[in-house]
Amino acid sequence: MEIESDGRSSTAPHCFGRTLLCTQVLNSAWRDRAVLLFGGRQAGKTTLLRSLASELGDRARTSDDSEVRDVPVYVDLLRLPFDAGPVDLFHLLARSASAACRLCVPDYSLESLPSHERPCLGSLETFATDIIAVCGATSTLEVRLLFLLDEAKRVLSSRFPRAFQDNLFALLYDDDLQVGSRIGVVLAGAQELYSFCEDSTSPLGSRAAFHPITNLSQDAVAEIVHVHFGRDGSEWLAEDMVEWVYSQTGGHAGLTAALSRRLSRHARKGEGDLRECVQQLVSQHYHLFRGWHNKLSDEALSAHDALLSSGTIGRRSVSKHLHENGYDPFGVDRACEELQFTGVAVMDKGVLTRVNEIYWEYVLDICERESGSSEERCVWAMIEEVERSLRMLVTGVYERLWPGESERRMRRTLSKDDIVKADKIRDEAPSRYRFSPMTDAPSFVECLYLGQLTSLMVANHAWGSFRSAFRDKRQLEDLVTGISLVRNDLAHFRKVPDKELMRCRICCDDLGAIVVQELQKVSGAGEDR
């Protein structure tokens, strides 16, 4: 069982091939008090955090012979309100810690947090007081709290004031606050975690332990394949099948699970075309590949392009390649790390090798990187990814709710003006280009804009299928508004203020992460039918 941020329990997911990493993260959290857990999208960060929460939670509830009770507090930071600040975060963590202790500590007696009575104190002091009260609300045990913070990007970079990182450091290492010895923190994220170690005024990176989530071993891949197929000795489970899956995904956790699900569905239907499985997988998950690509730093992209052309490249050659392309050659280690925790390369004995054939074939065929790395170009790519993914999500949900009648239901939902505009775009599409006529008209959804897609989501008859992903309708509308304004200006070559570009990037990050999670659910539901 795992401890959710609201104190409830739910079933922990399978966590294959991560036993050693779980142990290392846990040991580092208590020894160093802070862990930076690096991993790209679908690499298994959430699964690993929830597995830790499950293991620690079970141990805390069943252990009778230990005087120390380690209580896990798993928190998905995407649940924070869009405009949340440090005070909101500290309140959420304190409430979550109290709820977790209520489940795991037998004689836990705290009825309300001190912050309820003295809200006027500063956020740092208030949180420290709350944590001391939570850990001291038992007469027989010493309580330690392990905060497992998922989607750490929500509270890093420009999202929170720079002083937040200083406050976090003080909480963990300032003995005057009397909190550090009682807590450990695991921050899970991707490239944004580098802000802890690249900012000279942020000392947390010098004290925290670094743990990247790299690809799974072939043995772990075999376990995932067996879970989806069952252990019935089927010819689909021959050793060469596992090797094929491993070569296709490189051991990337999320991609391996998705491909295994699809293969098992084909096997049940008696369909054995493996390449068709891969093509279907790419058509449904291309947004994942684009997300990996867009997240890479300029240095990592430079190494990525060198790897694209050569297949393997030595560490020294990567450093030389960076220097020749105007980058700091000492950025070689970070560039290689990014490619590894993204799940598209492995480093062995100083040689970086391309893995994950599905991704690289996609890059070779479709996703050639455009030149330039301006902020506007980066934000535009993020907007494009979110908009495409949102269309896929709306299409999938409506088709699931109203099979064969999804477009008719959409038309009944939208205003007359919206329908007229969409029909005009679709009708004019075949002849839009004089010298390159289109043979197929776009779908109705492909002719809708972000605002119209939002209307389809918040409609009363459909909102029930989207509700669990958002705090409320206002959160969705605020995220889309932050993207739409910038999208329109960029599309018309108008200058966008830097502050609005950054806000749009944040909105794209948040909405993109939510949509990817929901697409996984829709895809899984479709495959189970």
Image (cartoon, rainbow, N blue to C red):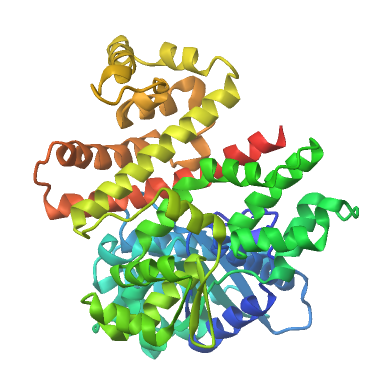
Residue at 86% across, 52% down: 235
Residue at 44% over, 76% down = 337
Q: Locate the N terminus by quadrant.
A: bottom right
**At which x and y percent is residue 247?**
64, 63
How far across and down, in percent of the image, does residue 191 sit? 38, 68
Measured as percent of width and height from the top left, residue 138 is found at 62, 75
In this orientation, which residue lies closer to the viewer: 417 or 463?
Answer: 417
Closest to the observer, 75 or 51: 51
- In screen coordinates, is 214 left or right of 372? right
Residue pictured at 68% horizontal, 64% vertical: 15
* Residue 226 location (% of width, % of height): 80, 57
State the image quarter where residue 68 is shown.
Answer: bottom right
Q: Is residue 518 visible?
A: yes
Image: 327 above or below 462: below
Q: Is residue 247 left or right of residue 506?
A: right
Quadrant in which residue 271 is drawn = top right
Q: Nearer the viewer, residue 356 or 85?
A: 356
